[in-house]
Amino acid sequence: MSASAQPPASLTHFSPAELDMLAKTADALSAYLGKPVLAEVALGDEGTEWVTFGVALDTDADETDDAAPHVQMGGAGARLLGGRGGLPDSDTESYDCLYLWAMQISLVEGERFIKLDQDGDECAWSDQLTDLLPFALSEDELPPDDDEDDEDDEDDEDGADDDGPGHNGDTHRH
């Protein structure tokens, strides 16, 4: 590949599965923080995509932390992921947001993803996006509820001997 040739989009852009993980992360952060978290995809100067995560600030709030980094997110033409923090006008209106962190794609081998902290410094990198996300996003099914435990508790209240082997049903106090 010559120096002027562009790498394929599969290397410079997030895949649909990766975008889905980033969307779920924004939604999970919204639920965890109890505030609207936006995730916006953009194309960097190098031709690689990055996603910025930010908490939409209340425009009516009396106090804002001006020392913390802010970003404008949303608005016309913005490519937002997930539930958009439940903000109704995110397609047309931009929001002043507290910058949380960003994820960018890198063309460096072994560092497909680079996470930038709140200061904009590289803080982590990996070939696997899941290694850098704040929540585990597995598709593993939860184990089924064990209703038998509830039934055992009811038996204990009735005085049934369900203490297991080695117990004679006497109450021991230590």
Image (cartoon, rainbow, N blue to C red):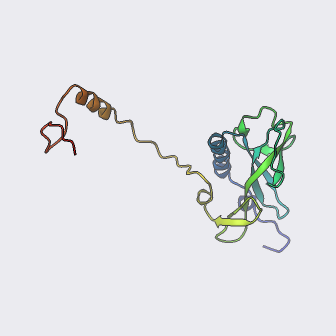
Hey, which residue is sitting farthest front in the picture?
174
Q: In which quarter of the image is residue 94?
A: top right
**Residue 128 location, x and y as percent?**
60, 61
* Quadrant housing the N terminus: bottom right
Q: Residue at the spot x=66%, y=39% of the render?
A: 34
Hey, which residue is sitting farthest top in the picture?
158
Residue closest to the eye, 69 or 12 = 69
Instruction: Using the image, determine if residue 26 lies above or below residue 10.
Output: above
Residue closest to the eye, 45 or 93 = 93
Q: In which quarter of the image is residue 152?
A: top left
Q: In which quarter of the image is residue 87?
A: top right
Total of numbered circles in the picture?
Answer: 0
Q: Residue at the spot x=71%, y=71% of the render?
A: 108
**Residue 103 location, x and y as percent?**
71, 58
Hey, which residue is sitting farthest bottom in the picture?
2
**Residue 135 location, x and y as percent?**
58, 51
Residue closest to the eye, 140 or 72 = 72
Residue closest to the eye, 171 or 119 = 171
**Residue 24 location, x and y as percent?**
64, 45
